Image (cartoon, rainbow, N blue to C red):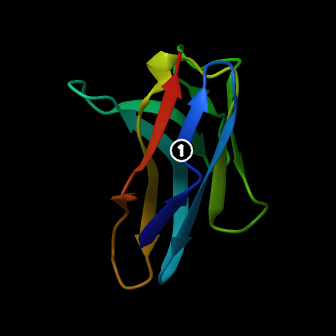
Amino acid sequence: VQLVESGGGLVQAGGSLRLSCAASGSIFFINVMGWYRQAPGNQRELVAVIPIGGSTNYADSVKGRFTISRDGAENTWNLQMSSLKPEDTAVYYCYCFAKPVSYMAYDNYWGQGTQVTVSS
């Protein structure tokens, strides 16, 4: 399973950005889709996840400002970020919990990360 992110960049505080993630490979099923982020000196933290068939989950710090969505039945998902703050500056990682066709079990998969920088 390969994940490729797009859409990061530099934005002023109060602005918006949209991140996208595309999963490819011989995927049997993706059970969870999501986004994490890691700021310098901090641990990687959950931003938002969509469990297939379950409810979306957001970090308290982004509730009401970020929206995670899936593109229909495609293995792509997005993170719409609005009212961005300087503290949202981080490398954002696309994530999924999936089962490849050739594997017996589900596993965690990560994208390479995309930088989001919010200037004050």
Q: Which residue is rendered at x = 51% and y = 21% of the image?
A: 59
Can you tell which quarter of the image residue 106 is in? bottom left
Q: Nearer the viewer, residue 20 or 119?
A: 119
76 above or below 11?
below
Q: Residues within 10 Å of mark 1 (few under 14, many from 20)?
A: some
Q: Quadrant of the N terminus?
A: bottom left
Mark 1 = which residue?
9
Q: Position of residue 27 (x, y in %)?
A: 50, 77
Q: Which residue is rendered at x = 51% and y = 59% of the image?
A: 5
Can you tell which quarter of the image residue 16 is in? top right
Pick out the residue farthest to the right.
72
Q: Amino acid at mark 1?
A: Gly
Q: Which residue is rendered at x = 57% and y = 26% of the image?
A: 58
Q: Which residue is rendered at x = 50% and y = 42% of the image?
A: 35
Q: Position of residue 42 (x, y in %)?
A: 24, 24
Pick out the residue farthest to the left.
41
Can you tell which quarter of the image residue 60 is in? top right
Q: Position of residue 11 (x, y in %)?
A: 60, 32
Q: Nearer the viewer, residue 60 or 88?
A: 88
